[in-house]
Image (cartoon, helix red, strand yellow):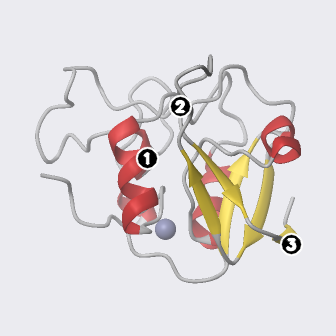
Amino acid sequence: MDPAPTAFADLPLDPELGAPVPFACGTDDRYGAARDGAPVSARTLDGRRVTQCALSRICGVCGAGLGRPIAFLGSPEEAARNAFHFPPAHLACAQALLAAYERVPGALLGQVEPPPSWVLVTTAAFEFVRPGREEVDRRPTFAPHAILEQVR
Ligand SMILES: [Zn+2]
């Protein structure tokens, strides 16, 4: 069972980083052990949760239903390709996550390498793009339809 939406302040903390672990990054250990037995981590995405966020239109940070605008957080490269790996989020949730990660070293949120900077954009709608069989990167991505604002 997946946990109910969790307020940002109540998100579990990554034991290594001391940083909040968003909904899309893994199973909340208050609701039972992580599926693979590993502690929750802000570094990697949980593919099952990513899909759940896409199909149920829920926030990748807090797990509650999305309104508008919808925020996407990623690297400059993801923004340039219009293909984000982290699921859609409330703008306030994305901003809180960025603030919490300001001094956290290393790659986070499923990024392969630490991005040189974070990009935060807003949109009114997005497409969930599943990779084709022939693609090297088999992770699904999110394509915002039109950028309303680049927040940072
Ligand atoms: Zn949220």
Label 3 beta carbon within 8 A of ligand 1: no
- Rendering coords of residue 121 (x, y %): 79, 62
Report if the CB atoms under discs 1 and 2 are less than 8 Å apart: yes
Q: Earlier in the sequence, mark 1 or mark 2?
A: 1
Real-space Cα separation, disc 1 to disc 3, in angstroms: 23 Å
- Rendering coords of residue 24 (x, y %): 43, 47
**Residue type marked 1:** Val
Residue 5 visible within the image: yes
Specify the quadrant that holds the C terminus. Answer: bottom right
- Element marked by disc 2: loop
**Residue type marked 2:** Arg
**Residue type marked 3:** Glu
Give left or right: position of 12 versus 17: left
Q: Residue at x 60, y 53 (%)?
A: 97
Picture layout, residue 147 above or below residue 142: below
Q: Which residue is mark 1?
A: 50
Q: Which residue is mark 2?
A: 139
Q: Which residue is mark 3?
A: 149
